[in-house]
Image: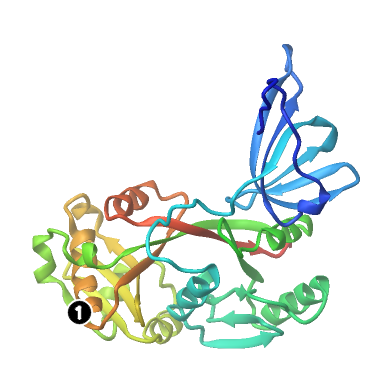
Amino acid sequence: MEITAGGLLEIRITPADVGKRVSVRRVDPGRGGPPGFSDAVGVLTSWNEGVLVITQKNAKTVRIAESSLVAGKVVPAAPARRRGPAASFEELARITARAWVPLESQPLGEWVLRASGGFTRRANSVLPIGDPGVPLDEALARVTSWYAERGLPAYVQAATGAVGTQEALCAELEARGWVNEVSAEVRVGALAPVGDLDAAAADDVRLTRVPDEEWLARYGRVRDPGPARRMLVEGPSVWFATLPGRAIGRMVTDGRWAGFGAVEVDPEHRRGGLATAVMAALARRALEEGASAAWLQVEADNPGARGLYDGMGFTTHHMYHHFRAAA
């Protein structure tokens, strides 16, 4: 919103700003009362026939009639101050993908189709970085067919909220009936503070290169241990952490980055600092391997984990979303 010296609101966006991050204010009709205002911030993904479409950080689209606009401006794509280790979206997208190496993959132009028997959407979805080499509708038809041949639902993993993310693709998928089934934050932070966390139980954490039966049993997302076991051990430098009978975790060290995942604590032992102990032990090993930065992924509807990672200094870099093909 812009307010001039005379107190007037100004509209400083045009259809030429499609693809940019904008902030707009519009008039909302009153419900039995006077009209009000509502604001929206996100990427302007289209402006056609008098209707603006703004895709927000959570991948939801907002349709706004041009006639209802009272203010609008282009805003920076990210805060000026840096939060956490510097990284581009593409760098992090490729780093996080290497932490969940699929059992099978196939290129579609610059996109990568990934399948792993259904174990974790991150390894059973399209990584759409770049150009698929064909029109979008044809690309999505090929994607749907490829997954159907493997008895799997078709998913596309698309990101929002940072420079270079895929708000336009999210809007196109939604327009074609694809459903956003789950959203997650990709968070980053300095690694050394995690290793320095005061967690007495960290010394009791057992680190191994492969998951044992106890680890797999604790990780409740494993339905078929065959594909899961094969996929979990793949990556640049993979470590599994176990506090016997209480907690587990997984970490992948990849150059300067250490990625944390699969942190699970037995319900009877929660709120006792065991997740912190697991991550501290893993971070110390990553520091020994030369890493300095950390990342993790946390689902948007997991307030407990988000609070834990807030306390460790992790901040949100961007979000990703798994869109499933319409039935």
Q: What colour scheme was applied to this rendering of the protein? A: rainbow
Q: Position of residue 184 (x, y in %)?
A: 49, 58
* Residue at x 25%, y 60% (from the top left corner): 265
Q: Residue 195 appears in which quarter of the rendering?
A: bottom left
Q: Residue 258 appears in which quarter of the rendering?
A: bottom left
The residue positioned farthest toward the right in the image shown? 49
34 w.r.t. 180: above or below: above
Residue nearest the viewer, comparing 158 with 227:
158
* Residue at x 55%, y 73% (from the top left corner): 90
Rate crowding at label 1 as few (under 14), some (14 to 19) or many (20 or more) other CA atoms within 10 Å: some
The residue positioned farthest toward the top in the image shown? 33
Q: Position of residue 101 (x, y in %)?
A: 47, 83
* Residue at x 73%, y 74% (from the top left corner): 144
In the image, 198: left or right of 219? left
Instruction: Give the total of numbered labels.
Output: 1
In the image, 24: left or right of 313? right
Q: Position of residue 17 (x, y in %)?
A: 76, 52
Residue nearest the viewer, comparing 266 with 36:
36
Which amino acid type corresponds to the residue marked 1 in the rendered image?
Answer: Leu
The residue positioned farthest toward the front in the image shown? 5
Looking at the image, can residue 88 be seen? yes
In the image, 25: left or right of 248? right
Q: Residue 179 appears in which quarter of the rendering?
A: bottom right
Residue nearest the viewer, comparing 179 with 162:
162
Q: Quadrant of the N terminus?
A: top right
73 w.r.t. 143: above or below: above
Looking at the image, can residue 119 be seen? no
Q: Quadrant of the C terminus?
A: bottom right
Which residue position is annotated with label 1? Answer: 207
Q: Position of residue 276 (x, y in %)?
A: 21, 59
Q: Secondary structure at mark 1?
A: strand
Residue nearest the viewer, comparing 91 with 200:
91
